[in-house]
Amino acid sequence: MRKTLFNALQVPFCGIAALTVAGNCYASEPLRPNVVFILADDVGYGDFSAYGAHRVSTPNVDQLADNGITFMNAHAVAATSTPSRYSLLTGQYAFRRTDTGVAAGNAASIIKPDQPTVAKVFKEAGYTTGVVGKWHLGLGETTGEQDWNSVVSPGPFELGFDYSYIMAATADRVPCVFMEDQRIANPDATSPVFVSYSTAFEGEPLGSTHPELLKMESSHGHNQAIVNGIGRIGYMKGGGTALWKDENIADSIVAKAINFIEKSKDNPFFLYLGTNDIHVPRAPHQRFVGKSGMGPRGDAILSFDWTVGEIMKALEENGLLENTLIILTSDNGPVVDDGYKDQAVELLGDHEPWGIFHEKGGKYSAYEAGTCIPFIVHWPDQIKEPAISPALISQVDFYATMAHLLDVPVSSAGPSDSQEQLDAWLGKDFTGRDFAVTQSGTLGIIKGIWKYIAPHSGAPYQAHTDIYTGYNAEDQLFNLQTDVSELNNVAADNPDIVEDLKASLEKVKRDFGVTFDDIKLEIAGAETKGNDGLPAEQNADYAIGKAFDGNLDNEYSSQWGGNTKMPVTLDFTLKEPDQVDYIVFYPKGPLTSNVNGYWNEFEVHTSTDGTTFTKANDYQFTLTQDDKAQTYIIKAPQKIELPEPAENVKTVRVVVKSSYHSNATNLPQLVSCAEVEIYKKDPVGFNPPQIDNSFQVVSRNGYVYVTGNNFPAQLFTMDGRSIHIKDRQSPGIYIVKADGYAKKIRVE
């Protein structure tokens, strides 16, 4: 049966006849519940019978739905595992960082020890915390340098979890061992573990070289290390008896989860349970094999449902079910063929993992099928009447919602992407968020009935997974009320809506991070101000503007060199129109030219109205040779006297040019790091602004910190691009933002 997204009543639920919640069914003083967050892997909107699936039955999931709040418009933050999980646990959109893509099995810990996490919220509230199952957020300090035969840290403990029993990455990636409290579980002393994602280990068979050893053939990728007769991604040696058996993964996860529940039952606890089901390789236990009629993928759905049932049974047997808040959802949308020939495609039949959405959307996709996922909230002590809710929900809100529930203050330095949505999650509010942001290779935003997908130059179709990515070089707009499958792009017919959604998306990026416009507003607003280095009588005549206060025209396309186009135009607006006689051009980062004899110059133009400009003159940079670098650089300020005083100037325009474009590789650095000082008198006695030594910036654990702040700051290039400290290009000038302010820093 085809369903309509906003008509939730068409979905079959036992005993639910209306989209209502009793007005008096919530206690005025809620108890502090135990919290169990069950995160399925690659389960789609249409994979549970609670959401309309008819080829497979999921009675335990249905039981939660029949007695809880079932959401029809809930979203994972991202269409792939690592960024989705990062956002879930930190409350921060993964796109704000450049190192949150799908993690290799030997990736360093992506969440840093000093970052706020939802586990730390529970710890602050006095909870016992545990994580069991799939992790996929990296372990250790440095990628590829883990000693797998010792304690690997940082990891879950440093992020707020008292106990952990995890898969370092995914079942299709090495290392294929469980890590218990950040050590290999049940280690085999005779077979130490070694992992590489670059070089195969001599003597170790690979899926690509020894296909005869495989019991599950790869359809794409998954042809490196062989473990348990299955080819994996990455190379591995050793493990011995510590290696997992894929058929027993669900049983191992359930056993450890139940053990945690039983040990923690006397105090409030938080359990983050990440199942392996239904991620590839799909190798469910023998008791599920063949039971779904849809091959290993369908059988894995049954295995997941069994996991849910076992957790519910353990809670009930320990007298905990009534006051346990269970949240069940998936990390992203579905994929049928994700790298193994397991007959998932051939046996799919009329089962629709993507549910009501684009039938070729799903995991990896910008379409709704990539991020709109099952989401069920169950809390018998507080939810007295079940409901189907159309509220717009995002997993990024787990952080702030739990902080609100537990009355734990969220630090001002913590994530600002997470919103408190407790009323919506408990079925009191059927509206939820004003909008939700989603991430694949591009960003999307859902607001009301509209879905906007930002342009992306990637391929629109992924052949090996048979998924349409939703990428398009043009703006895309879909009316989800009339076109839930996102087949008809109506952007051209609704330009105002497109602009509104684009503006909302840009505001999201701007509110937490720093964009080019933010830098202009927060740091470099052109203003008239005094300077202690000037004689007192000249203070009133000193006006300063900075190059990133200017308007970079459309020709500017470079980030720290490469593809630089000339010229670069920079405009500086004075607070009040005035006479201009002198300009001092201050390069904060050197302009280099690797070829002796080539020159660089700039023009100065003035305008009384900000529209019509008069050229004053051409000025050539003074280059000096740096013996160490064997390049020619600008080191000294360039003091320029205009041929004639410019009267009543409102705007000064500087146009930067080069006579040898390809060698002006650092020109964007010069431009973005320059300051322009504007005078109506000769700036005699001027002293350059001094460095504020009270503002110290240090790098620790891969993050940037500023004096007096225990929380990481954000680091940005001068054009507003968010970067990780390890990705910086030194030397250079960067923006560091913390506690609501932003400053320039020089990295030597």
Image (spheres, grey):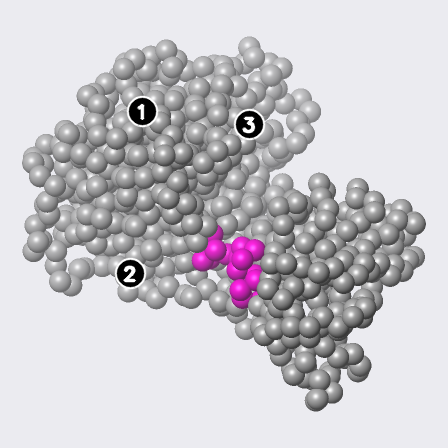
Q: Which residue range is magenta in the image? A: 509-523
At label 3, the amino acid type is Ile
Q: Quarter-wise, where is residue 223 in the image?
A: top right
Q: Residue at x 82, y 60 (%)?
A: 619
Kindly identify which residue carries mark 1: 353
Label 1 to label 2, Cα distance in Å? 34 Å
- The quarter of the rendered structure image containing the C terminus is bottom right
Q: Secondary structure at mark 3?
A: loop
Kindly identify which residue carries mark 2: 404
Name the mark nearer the viewer: 1 or 3.
Answer: 1
Q: Residue at x 24, y 37 (%)?
A: 72
- Residue 235 in the image: state x and y as whole percent: 60, 29
| Secondary structure character of the magenta stretch overall | helix
Residue 600 vertical placement versus 490 (above, below): below
User: Is residue 59 rendered magenta in the image?
Assistant: no
- Residue 542 in the image: state x and y as whole percent: 68, 78
Q: Residue at x 61, y 19 (%)?
A: 205
* Mark 1 or 2, nearer chain start: 1
Query: In front: 285, or 134?
Result: 134
Could you tell me how many numbered marks the image carries? 3
Query: In front: 537, or 644?
Result: 644
